[in-house]
Amino acid sequence: MEEGTSKSPSNRASTVDYGDADPFQWDTREDCQVRQILDRIADKWSLLVIALLDDRRLRFTELRREIDGVSQRMLTVTLRSLERDGLVKRTVHPVVPPRVEYELTSLGRTLHTTIQSLVTWTEEHQEEIAHARTAYDTRAAGAAETTAS
């Protein structure tokens, strides 16, 4: 290693201008709070729950009916985690049988806005992504044929 250089992120060279985005801002260690939160909110079930609860309350059965492929256990785990993180509010109504409703908290609504931006980006670029996938699959199939020969 040359004198004056270091592999430490705190001493990285600042010759590249990243603007406001710092590519080293996320700690990739498993015990990092940011990583743990991103892991929670970026999983497919959490994203779908947050999207469905936009400006409305839903019961567990309504959520399960709306989310294709989610198991009862996975939805329960997801809702508990979102509630623990302060993104979803669970309200139990004292009736027989108990009626439980879920809704976004004010914090959850701010996250919904961010998720909506991601969904909009996906809708705007889905054709480009489909073309890229097709091109990749064609190249991969050609490489497999060459290797097999």
Image: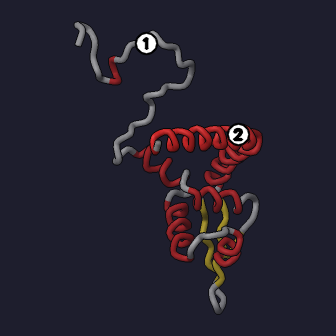
Quarter where residue 63 is shown: bottom right
Q: Which residue is mark 2?
A: 131
Numbered badge on residue 6: none
Q: Position of residue 23 (x, y in %)?
A: 47, 27
Q: In front here: 142 or 21?
A: 142
> Mark 2 against mark 1, which lies toward the viewer?
2
Which residue corresponds to the image point at 75% horizontal and 41% vertical from the top-left? 127
Q: Residues within 10 Å of mark 2 (few under 14, many from 20)?
A: few
In contact (CB < 8 Å): disc 2 and disc 1: no
Q: Position of residue 35 (x, y in %)?
A: 44, 45
Q: Which residue is mark 1?
A: 14
Q: Position of residue 98 (x, y in %)?
A: 62, 86
As helix, strand or loop, the secondary structure at mark 1 comes to loop
Q: Is residue 10 above or below residue 110?
A: above
Q: Residues within 10 Å of mark 1 (few under 14, many from 20)?
A: few
**Disc 2/disc 1 C-alpha distance (Å):** 36 Å
Q: Is residue 39 above or below residue 129?
A: below
Which residue corresponds to the image point at 65% horizontal and 92% vertical from the top-left? 96
Q: Give left or right: position of 112 versus 16.
A: right
Image quadrant in which the N terminus is located: top left
Q: Position of residue 66 (x, y in %)?
A: 71, 70
Q: Is residue 63 above or below residue 42?
A: below
User: Which amino acid type is shown beneath numbered disc 1?
Assistant: Ser
Q: Give left or right: position of 3 versus 91.
A: left
Quarter where residue 100 is shown: bottom right
User: Which amino acid type is shown beneath numbered disc 2?
Assistant: His
Circle count: 2
Q: Give left or right: position of 15 versus 18.
A: left
Which residue corresponds to the image point at 28% horizontal and 12% vertical from the top-left? 5
